[in-house]
Image (spheres, rainbow, N blue to C red):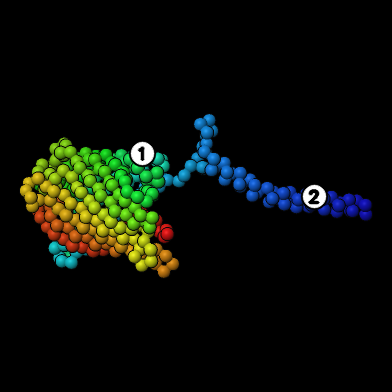
Amino acid sequence: MLHTMRASFFQLYLAGLLVVGHVARAEDAPSTAAATADSRRRPASDDEAVPASALPELDLLTFYKDNYVLAGFTYSTEVKFQFSAKFDLWPNSGPHAFYFAFTQKTLWDVYRASAPFVESDYSPELFYSYFHAPGRYEPDPGCGFFLERLGVVHESDGLAGPRSRGWNRVYGESRYACYTPQRNYGALTLQVWAPPFGKPDNPGIVSYLGYGELSLAIGSDRGHAWLGDWEIALHARKGTRSLATGSVEADARWRPRYSDFWRFTPYLYGQAFTGYGETLLSYDRALTAIRIGIGFTDRSTRSQ
C-alpha cells in the first residue's frame, strides 16, 4: 500500500513538473520573439555577421519589357506576341544592379490554314542599371531622375541566307520620372546607341531606325476604384535616310483594381504602330498595324 502511494505521488510530481515547465516556456516565448525581432531591427556591426535568414528576399527572375499577346483586325495583320524577362546577376537591395535579359518578339499568321510563324526576333542583352530611388521601384513622391542604364544587345531573326537579319549595339539610357502620393506617374526615357558593331546582315538599318528612341509614359500602378492600373506610352524613332523614315508606336493598357470582385490580373492591351522597323525583316518597309489583346506585368496586386 505504501509502495503504491509513493508511486502515485511520484507520478503526480512528474506531471506537475511537466505542466510548470510548459507554462514557463509559454510565458518566455513572447520575450524571446521580441528579442529576435529586435535583433533583426538592429543593424549589424562590422564585426557581426548577418545570417542568411535575416537578409531580405529578392526576386531574381522578373519581367523586363512589355509582355503581351495581340491580334489585328485584318488578314494581313498577324497575331503579335512578345515575352521578355531579366535575371538579376548580382542580387542586392542597393542602387547598383547587373542583369541578363532575353526578349522574343513573334508574328504569327493564325489566319492561314497552317498558322505559320512569320518571323521571330530574339534579343539577348546584358546591362547595368543605377537606381536613384532607395527602393528602386518604390520612389518617393516628386520628380527626379529615376535610373540610368548601360548595356549591350544582340538582335537577330535567327535565319540564314537572304532572310537573315541582325545587328549588335551598345546603348545608354536615362529616365526622368514624376510620382504622386496616389502612385500616378509620368516618365520620359531616352535611349541612344552607338553605330552597330560587328558585321550586320542589314548595314543600312540605322537609316530607318536611327540612333535612339524617345519614350513618354503616363499612368498609375495602384489606381483607385474602377480606374485601376493603367498606362499610355509613346515610343518614337527617327531614321537618317529622310524626314519620312522612323516610327511611332503607341501602347495602352488597363485593368480594374485587383480586389474582392476582380481577380483577373492580365491587362487589356492595345497597340498601334506606324513606320519602319516593327520587326527586323520589315525594317526597310513602311507599314501600319493596330492590334488589341492582353498584356502581362509583374506588378503587385496590392491596392492602396
Q: Is residue 80 left or right of residue 62?
A: left
Could you tell me which residue is drawn at 13 percent across and 48 percent down?
238
Residue 123: x and y, percent?
24, 46
Residue 89 visible within the image: no
Q: Assign a secondary structure to mark 2.
A: helix
Q: Among all residues in the image, which is located at the extreme bottom?
A: 261
- Horizontal side, residue 111 vs residue 49: left or right: left
Distance CA(mark 1)–CA(mark 2): 60 Å
The amino acid beneath tag 2 is Leu
Give the quadrant of residue 227.
bottom left
Q: Is residue 268 left or right of residue 194?
A: right
Q: Is residue 220 visible?
A: yes
Residue on which the image places disc 2: 14
Q: Which mark is residue 209?
A: none
x and y percent of residue 272 in the render? 19, 60
Give the residue displayed 25% in from the left and 49% down from the top: 188
Task: Name the residue located 16 percent from the left edge and 54 percent from the top edge.
Answer: 248
Quarter containing the N terminus:
bottom right
Q: Which residue is mark 1?
A: 96
| Residue located 20% across and 42% down the image | 192
Q: Determine the image quadrant of residue 268.
A: bottom left
CB under 8 Å between discs 1 and 2: no
Depicted 293 relative to depicted 205: above or below:
below
